[in-house]
Every structure is written in C-alpha cells, then in structure tokens.
Image (cartoon, rainbow, N blue to C red):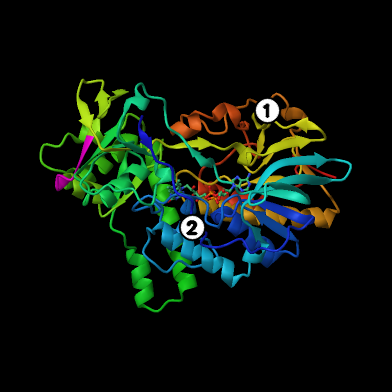
Amino acid sequence: MPDTVTAPPKSAALDATSPALPREVDVLIVGAGISGIGAAYHLATVTEKSFVVLETQETFGGTWWTHRYPGVRSDSDLFTFGYRFKPWVGAPIASAGEILKYLAEVLEENDLERHIHYRHRVTQARWSSDLGRWAVTVKDLATDQEHDISAGFIWMCQGYYRHGEAYTPEWEGFDRYKGTIVHPQRWPEDLDYIDKRVVVIGSGATAATLIPAIAPEAAHVTMLQRSPTFYFVRPNVNELANTLRELDIPDEWTHEIVRRKITHDMDAITRLSFESPDFLREFLLDTIRPLLPEGFDVERHFSPTYRPWQQRIAVLPEGDLFRCIRDGKASVVTDQIECFTENGIRLASGEELAADIIITATGFNMSVLGDVDFSVDGRTVDFADTVTYRGIMFTGVPNLAYVFGYFRASWTLRADLISDFVVHLLEHMDEVGAKSVTPHLREDELDMRLGPWVDPENFNPGYLTRSLHLLPKQGDHDPWRLLHEYGQEKDLLPTADLEDGSLIFK
Ligand SMILES: Cc1cc2nc3c(=O)[nH]c(=O)nc-3n(C[C@H](O)[C@H](O)[C@H](O)COP(=O)(O)OP(=O)(O)OC[C@H]3O[C@@H](n4cnc5c(N)ncnc54)[C@H](O)[C@@H]3O)c2cc1C
C-alpha cells in the first residue's frame, strides 16, 4: 500500500474568536477567500446592510490558505489579482504568504474580521417566497451543531473547487506503490523530499511552481505529463510600476495606471490567441527555446495540441522551471501512465520511472455553488436546469449572486465588478421597495439556444469539462451569457439595465 500522506491538522493561525452567529442578516456571504473579503469590503464601505461571512476553514484566504506546497504563488500579477481599492506595492507575482498578508491588511483596515465566522459550513439554503427570505443552515464544525440564519440575500463567494477534496484520477496498480503519494492540495508539512527521486504528475501552474521549489534539494524531479502546457516566461518586475514609484507617484495612482496597462496588454494577447493562434504559439515557444538545453525537444514537451489560452497559460517568473531542466535537476517526460508499480510508474512507452515520492498535481474537483443544498419553496434547485443571468445569478433562484472570476485574466477583476453589481442591485431593490429579485427568461427567449456554462471551444481545462453537466447553462445573447473578457465586461456590467424585464422584482 502506498503511504498516502494527508495534510496534518492546520495550526490555528487565527483562532475562532468571533461573536455568536447573528440570527438574521440582510446579506450572507459564503467563503472568506479573496472574493468573500472583497464582497464584505463593498457591503461595509458602500452600504448600511447587515451581513455575515461564513467560512469552513479556520482562517481567511481560501485558495491561499488551502495550498501549502513549496513555492506556492500566484501566476497572475497582483496589480490585477489584488483589489481595485487596495494598491499592491510589491513585485507582480506574489507568494501565498504575501497574498494572505495583503488580505489581512484589508480585513484590519476595514474592521471586517468581526463579521467572519470561521469553521462554519453552510449546508442548506431554503427560500420562502412568503417570507421573501432564505433560511440558511450552518454547521459549526467545532461543536457539530447546526444553526439557522435568516438572510435576505446570499452572496456565494466559494470559489470553484472543493477545498477539502483533491482530484486524483484512478490508475491501475495505485495501491501497489510502496513510496509516498502526495496531492499538492493536501501537502504534509513534514514531507521530506531531500535527496529523494520525485515524480510530479501534471504540467499546469501547480507543477510548474512546485518543481523549481523542490528540485534544488531533491535528488531529481521528473515532470510527467500526458500533454504539454503553454508557459509565459517573464521577469518578476513591472518596469512601469518601478518607474512610477521612482517618481514618487502615489501608490493609488500607480496601482490604477499599471492595472490599465496590464489589462490592455492582456486583451491584446487574448485577441491574438483567437485571431493568430499559430503566431502566438510560435512566439511563446521562441521565448522558451533559448532557456532549454541544446537538442531539447520543445515541440514534444512544450507545444500543446490546443490553442494558446484555451487552457490557462502558466507564468514562469524568470523561467525558473527551465533553469532546473538546464541544471539537470529536473526533466520532462511526455507519456501516458500505464500503471503504478511497487517502485514507481510504468509508462505506455514501456519506460519505468522509479520514484520515492509521487506528487499528483492532477487538479481539482469542482464545487457547484459550495455544495450547498438550495431549494426554492420546497423544490430542490438543480443548477444545471437554470440559465445564468450575466454569469452572476440564475433563473428561478431569487436573491442569490455567485462570484466566478475570469480564466484568462485575474479572478479578482471580475470579483470587483460583481461586487459593484450586487451593491447596485441591492440599492435598486431598496429604491423600488422590492424584497426579492429573480432572473427569468422573457417570453421571446423561452426557446433561446442554450449552451454550457463555458464553451469548451473557448476554454477547456479538465476540472471544468468533467463538471460541465452540473453547471448552469448560458444563452446566446446578453444578459444570459457568461462573458470571459474583462475588456467587454468592465463597461457592460456597470451599465446593466436592471429593468429590461429579465429580472423580476417583488
Ligand atoms: C494554487 C492556485 C493558484 C491560483 N492562482 C491564481 C492566479 O494567479 N490568478 C487567478 O486569477 N486565479 C488563480 N487561481 C484561482 C483562484 O482559486 C482564484 O483566483 C481565487 O483565489 C478564488 O478566490 P475565491 O475567494 O473566489 O475562492 P477560494 O479561494 O476558493 O475561497 C473560497 C472559500 O469558500 C469556502 N467555502 C466553500 N464552500 C463553503 C461553504 N459551503 N460554507 C462555508 N465556506 C465555504 C472555502 O473553504 C474557501 O475558503 C489559483 C488557484 C489555485 C488553486
């Protein structure tokens, strides 16, 4: 049997000292990651609404708390992954620790922590049209007790994957392996990889971050991939930000100017990925060729079959993964796994990779709306039967907003836009005296052509395609589409017509 290590209990960095749960709130936020904290900031600073934030884990940060593997960092720049309202003053790519510190400052500067209840999982939400409210069941994980909170509106900020459960495919002979198997989502603090032969299965951002962090001390690290990933190689500096800082421009201005420059450049690259994918492919490969040893088969190992940006392009600050390959501390194998053996992995090519440790950087299990059981007037909601309103709300489900960020740009750019939208929506409800708002298809839209939440032709990573059948549908025109480009949405969302008949206010 493999020694499948699970993460040790997390040290309670912040102990749950929050006051008793409120029985009734205007808005209930699920999740205290970057989206939930952003939502709380907007409610606290722009509205008078009462609210509570419920979080399963023992502290804030979501993704940046869950992931503890060596080298864990963003692959977006923090000017755009950071909030619009809080300047980023460091280098563009940040470690998980730096992101948590930034979030801690947002909590402290805005006195938000008192609204958060850690170790509280939201399990059920029942809408009553008679009351015009949600009854929300919350499990206190410290005591195992359940509590009900009455909420006027629910704001789902639970991210897109299950934090408590990682995705590992089923491989033949998995149980035969005698070494140690680790998933990066459950990284054991005491994992000893010094002088060990390590195989990392996967080639996404996680593998590309992890390998340079462990390769110098490991005996050797092999990145085993079924298919290649595109990489952007960049220095971890932003010249424009540095110049503006040298000129003593206020941090707020620098933040805004650099955000505009980055989003402008990212839009251009996204356009290129659709209009001239071959050119972009060659450009990306040309930047990495000189960083690899002579004779390295770049086409085989680093030229994916898909179009650039059809899956996320992983950023390699300073090309650190390639440095490890040049130094002989890491190598890449592109092959299929036939089975696990006692000592490692046998590949379809017949080659056997011996390993003391196997790291399965194989991705996530999607969490549909936080795995909360939703019902409306006694009827269970199956989100796959709903159509999304602007990728934020769902037909037939009142007073519920959901934060789902961009794939090709920083998640937080969209989280900020959605915060503005929800605050605007809540203000509008007050103005028109409505207790509820429910998206519904207008008469002439009832037979609108529906498609999946995300068109696989547009974006198709494994975790998403595995779960598309569980996710809401989208229509073929606004406001029933989930837009993927910040450039489009930044102007559309703030000017959305709330009285175009697609939202029913009561
Ligand atoms: C390793 C890694 C690196 C990434 N890097 C980037 C990047 O550089 N740029 C980028 O744009 N995106 C990146 N992403 C995607 C990333 O997840 C998002 O950008 C962002 O962190 C999501 O924030 P969030 O607050 O929406 O969700 P999360 O960070 O997933 O946080 C959601 C929180 O909700 C809680 N929760 C869930 N369900 C419930 C429930 N029922 N009750 C109570 N609490 C609940 C969870 O415990 C969690 O703490 C990365 C993802 C990973 C895994």
| Quadrant location, the C terminus | top right
Give the farthest residue toward the bottom: 248
Q: Position of residue 136 (x, y in %)?
A: 75, 46
Residue ID for mark 1? 385
Three-letter amino acid code at the position of disc 2: Ser
Residue at 68 percent across and 28 percent down: it is: 385
Residue at 52 percent across and 65 percent down: it is: 104
Q: Position of residue 134 (x, y in %)?
A: 79, 45
**Quadrant of the rendered image containing residue 304:** top left
Asked if 473 appears above or below 44 in the picture, the reply is above
Residue at 34 percent across and 71 percent down: it is: 243
Other residues around mark 1 within 10 Å, as few (<14) / some (14–19) / many (≥20)? some
Q: Position of residue 424 (x, y in %)?
A: 71, 56
Q: Which residues are magenta?
A: 326-332
Please name which of the two marks, 2 or 1, marks the residue nearer to the observer: 2
Other residues around mark 2 within 10 Å, as few (<14) / some (14–19) / many (≥20)? few
C-alpha gap between disc 2 and disc 1: 41 Å
Q: Nearer the viewer, residue 352 or 445?
A: 352
**Quadrant of the rendered image containing residue 32:** bottom right
Three-letter amino acid code at the position of disc 1: Asp
Asked whether the viewer can see residue 220, the reply is: yes
| Quadrant location, the N terminus | top left
Look at the image and say whether residue 235 sits in the magenta stretch: no
The tag on residue 493 is: none
Residue ID for mark 2? 11
Q: Is mark 2 within 8 Å of ligand 1?
A: no
Asked whether the viewer can see residue 503, the reply is: no
